[in-house]
Image (spheres, rainbow, N blue to C red):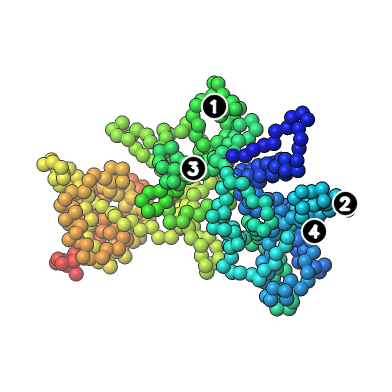
Amino acid sequence: MENRVNYFERQFLRSQDFRDEQAYHIAMRRRHNVAHHSWGIVRGLELIANDEGLFIQPGLAVDGYGRELLLAERRRLAPTVFEDVGGDLVDVYLTYGRVESDPPPAGFVECDPDGGNNFYRSQERVNVRLLRADPEADPRCPREVLPGDRAFNPARRPPDSPLVGWPVFLGQLARDAEGRAGALAANRPYAGLVGEVIHTPARRARLVVGQALADVAPQDGRRFAVHLRATDDDPCGVVATGVASTDEAQLEIVTRHAGEAWTTKVDVRGATTVHGSVAIAGGALEIKDETPPPNFARPWQVYRVTRPADDDKGTIHEMRVELPARQEEEIAQLVIGAWSAEEKRFRPCLTVTNACTVIVHGKLIAADFLTRVEGAPDTDSDATAPAYLHSAGLTPEARSQLMGMLGSGIVGAKLRDIVPSRDTIPIITRQVAARRNAAAATPAHSTLESLETLTDVLARTSEEEMKSLLGRIFTDKPELAERVRAVRNLITDKLPRAPQAGGGGNN
């Protein structure tokens, strides 16, 4: 409990009353320094090493007992500091000091019953301490401070005696092999603020630092948040009238203690612009929430939407990459590629343009070509339904003949009738899965499978169907149609399919 001096008219005052008055205000000021702030350098006090010598710049610091360390003028250090400490690396500290000054004139000393403290003034000053660098020293935990004082409780009265020290680290002076001196500023402890919430004067913004989570024990969860409001709050922090009561932070970082580990979650609300690169270490980018399809353009955006299926039977979930709308002489592209170390340039592999053009720069490998087989039983019922099976391999001669047809697109029209699109492929039956497993022993090249599919298509196409198809494609070139028919006959009649693994076949 602190006692203040109480004054009244015609009071007889002693020197102790004035000392008590000073001590009260000194203690309360120092309590503020260490209760509302953390100790350390407030401003300045940089170390300087140049052609003029070694210096400490003017500045202010507060030690761990709340005592101000004020250096009003630049202080020069002795050029022999390295020899004095016996090393090429010197730790520089400031400590609190006080000296008595202005002694009373002769004849007045005897009037002081205390004796020995007969000075009119006490000068608070700072002392510079130079020590040989200690690699194990912790600037935030000075060794000479008593362990019970390192987290000084401001409820105690801070000591005033200079004999109770708390050194504040300013940095290091270093000398190289050629004798040149320099200053190092690493690990300087700076003063800070102590509190949980910082408000702006209008209370439109507040910064929450280390707030305990409401749903967990105080030691098991902390929160850092930035809140911004469009209107002023009242002094008690209640949202102004007419404003929504939702109090979501624009930036929120929450840590929780789960078991033996800590987890951290960061939330950013609202549009966010990152000026620079973003790296994801050991994680993934996830777009969690879906929205209805927008009724406005969202160029150069990646987002998820939910929409009804085209046949109104079910729901479709889409991940969209939206390009800008097409304009004359302006093309927007989504390009996937890789850097070429040999060519020293980016080489595209796949390009999608906003004109709905897809360009493959290189080989296109279809890993799962399927052909249709009628009458296979459905997996979940006894009813029959179409199934789609892998076709068998081809001999090298057949592959050679079909490569030209595959590249020219001659069979494209017929393939559309037989090979289903991915949106309409039914569930593969158990029989299909069994056939796949049996064929898995033979490595299959994707091009091989696509050519197999063409062979099956041609084999099941009658002469009349082929004639009609080629007539529509080559209306003005009947001689080319005849050449294609000849190739078809060669493939289906003279170049039999290659044998399956584990089975027989013609060679």
- Residue shown at the point (78%, 30%) measured from the top left: 10
Q: Which amino acid does label 4 sit on?
A: Arg
Q: Which of marks 1 and 2 is nearer the N terminus?
A: 2
Q: Which amino acid does label 1 sit on?
A: Val
Q: Distance between the residues labelled 1 and 3?
A: 20 Å
Q: Which amino acid does label 3 sit on?
A: Arg
Q: Earlier in the sequence, mark 1 or mark 4?
A: 4
| Nearest to viewer (mark 2 / mark 3) | 2
Q: Nearer the viewer, residue 146 or 459?
A: 146
Residue bearing mark 2: 107
Q: Which mark is residue 437?
A: none
| Nearest to viewer (mark 1 / mark 4) | 4
- Residue shown at the point (31%, 65%) measured from the top left: 400
- Residue shown at the point (44%, 43%) measured from the top left: 218
Residue at the extreme right of the image, as rendered: 106
Q: Earlier in the sequence, mark 4 or mark 3?
A: 4
Quadrant where the C terminus sits is: bottom left
Find residue 55 and report its horizontal and vertical position in percent.
77, 63
Is residue 231 shown to the viewer in this render? no
Residue bearing mark 1: 238
Q: How far apart are marks 4 and 2 (CA)?
A: 39 Å
- Dividing the picture into quarters, in which one does residue 391 lie? bottom left
Q: Eyeballing the image, is 291 above or below 84?
A: above
Q: Do the residues labelled 1 and 3 touch (CB within 8 Å)?
A: no
Q: Which amino acid does label 2 sit on?
A: Gly
Find residue 117 and report its horizontal and vertical position in percent.
77, 53
Judged from the image, the secondary structure of the residue bearing numbered disc 4 is loop
Dot 4 alpha-carbon crowd within 10 angstroms: few under 14, some 14 to 19, many 20 or more: some
